[in-house]
Image (cartoon, rainbow, N blue to C red):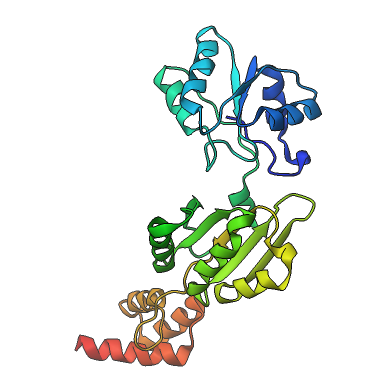
Amino acid sequence: MVATPIGNLADIGLRAVHVLGLVDAVACEDTRHTGGLMQALGCDKPLISLHQHNEHSAAQQVMARLAHGQRVAYVSDAGTPGVSDPGARLVEAVRGAGHVCVPVPGPSSLTALLSVAGQGGDDPRFVFHGFLPAKGAARETAVQALAQDPRGHIVLESPHRIEALAQDLARLQERPLTIGRELTKQFESVHQLRAADWPAWLANDKNHSRGEFVVYVHPAPPAADDEGIPAAAERTLVALLAELPTKTAVKLCADITGQPRNALYERALQLKSADR
């Protein structure tokens, strides 16, 4: 399973080039697209068409070659195969037949966007959705579930549905978004804005709606208690109060969490009073 560039050919890995030159055949999502890539790399190999509509039957061609001791690479049109691209059924069939499946890592649009989103230090968790359902109740259910989940979320979208996605996610209001458009390509752009502002941003320039999109919905702010202290900060405060004098616990909690010392002190007094 060989990862290939998502736009810029220079992102191809040295190991990927070596493997594509070494194998006996290359199965691929689109023979025309991969044919151009192979020509650019100076590799001349038989190509096997294997995409989402024929993955089961084409997998039999791959396994026939494997049964004869050949080595076969699989590539999707861009990025890492099997991740929101064909390839998962092929892997299942290959492993089921007792053959070895080896990953050759490389470009990925979702990790590329995460690397410039400035998120992940405090809570690196995120949910990768791929493409949301195109329409109807399934799409509404998916959007509602995303909006109610405080974790980060990554969504892929095509240009002809990007305006609909912007309208759907605008209900998240203050949640920050990092929007990657045409990543690694000539007209690459990365923008950060509030979810509520995204529809207007798209409408402001028709070029904003062009190209392939990767969208990161940042995690929701930590839930706060009735006194406005984030739940995580209160847990830290409680742990410190159990071992230290109140003033020392409050000072350390303020240093650790960045919360205002006065608010922490008031909350500490309330917690101690409740324990009596």
Q: Is residue 45 above or below residue 265?
A: above
Q: Is residue 65 above or below residue 135?
A: above
Farthest-out residue, front: 136
User: In the image, residue 215 lies at what x, y percent?
Assistant: 58, 59
Quadrant the N terminus occupies? top right
**Can residue 118 be spotted in the picture?**
no
Q: Is residue 270 above or below residue 254?
A: below
Q: Quadrant of residue 195?
A: bottom right
**Can residue 160 be spotted in the picture?**
yes
Residue at image location 67% in from the left, 23% down from the top: 19
User: In the image, residue 27 lies at what x, y percent?
Assistant: 60, 24
Residue at image location 45% in from the left, 93% down from the top: 262
Q: Is residue 32 above or below residue 136?
A: above
Foreground pick, 115 / 273:
115
Residue at image location 49% in from the left, 52% down from the top: 128
Q: Is 261 displayed left or right of 195 in the figure? A: left
User: In the image, residue 26 lies at what x, y percent?
Assistant: 64, 22
Foreground pick, 49 / 18:
49
